[in-house]
Amino acid sequence: MEQTDDLKLSPQVNVYLLTENRLLRDTLARLLKKRSEINVVGVSRSSETVKDEILSSHCDVVLTDCFDNTARSTFLRDVLGQDSGVKLLLFGMNDDPDVFFNAVFLGICGYLLKDASAAEIVAAVHAAVRGEATCPPSLCMTLIRHLSEKRQGKFETSHPQNGDRKALTPRQLQLLRLVADGKTNKEIAADLNLSQFTVKNHIRRVMRQVEAASRHDAVSLVRATGQLTTP
């Protein structure tokens, strides 16, 4: 009861609902319209033509499940890039670190999984207006770990062994040994308790560092330097 009273006292939030599934769109729109503190200013499916409609609606939050790392993310990036102050809240998402990271880099303020309840969606909308982020604790921890590893990787790369710009860090060599064993990024991520996104970034960094055209080319080039030996 206390939480309900707090929401009633919240300032009115203008929400634009964007989802492909018509049944979900209609159901969620009806649910949101029952909330006195939420004003649904638009309901639509994803398309390039709706971008201007979203911006002209002066909405506070775009609530959408339209995100797939390709055309839709480009469309949403255009909406966020207009300096309109619009908050982007994703719902109905998969527990996928790669998709989550891409959404974070896009500038989202919330990431709700497929099992999120209606109450959790409403709470995330209010959190977005307050300038707060909403995301699953497990993905939040993955993001923290990724940023920590990225910072450590930069530190190690800035101090190459023996002054050789092609000398690799212990972590990079560990990854390359697994690549040499024929393992995929998914398998390497599982072995090292990393996200696939982190593994992919590490390998790309190694390829740039040794000027390799492919991951297997990187293995060959590093092996030729004598660095890729059994630890």
Image: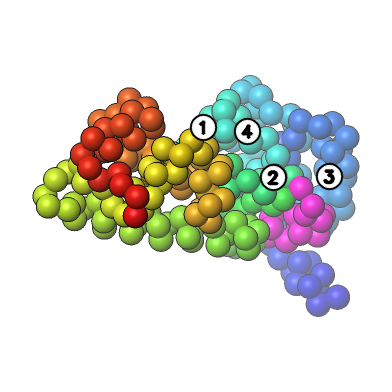
Circles 3, 1 touching at the beta carbon (< 8 Å) = no
Q: Earlier in the sequence, mark 3 or mark 2?
A: 3
Task: Please tell me which of labels 2 and 1 falls first in the chain.
Answer: 1
Q: Residues within 10 Å of mark 3 (few under 14, many from 20)?
A: some
> Mark 4 belongs to which amino acid?
Asp
Q: Secondary structure at mark 4?
A: loop
Quadrant of res 133: bottom right
In the image, 194 versus 147, the foreground residue is 194
The reply to whether residue 118 is in sight is yes
Q: Residue furthest bottom?
A: 2
**Mark closer to the chain start, 3 or 1:** 3
Q: Is residue 203 left or right of residue 30?
A: left
2 relative to 10, above or below = below
Gap between marks 4 and 1 measured at Cα = 15 Å
The furthest residue to the top:
49
Residue at (51%, 39%) from the top-left corner? 183
Give, as a three-letter code, the residue at label 1: Asp
Label 3 with label 4: CB-CB less than 8 Å: no
Residue 203 image position (x, y, % from top left) = 39, 40
Q: CA distance from mark 3 to mark 1?
A: 25 Å
Q: Which residue is mark 2?
A: 94
State which region is magenta: 114-126
- The first of marks 3 and 4 along the sequence is 3
Residue holding disc 1: 78
- Does 82 sit left or right of 14 as displayed? left
Question: Residue under circle 4?
Answer: 68
> Magenta: predominant secondary structure element?
helix
Distance between mark 3 and mark 2 Cα atoms = 19 Å
Are discs 4 and 1 less than 8 Å apart at CB? Answer: no
Q: Residue at x 81, y 59 (%)?
A: 119
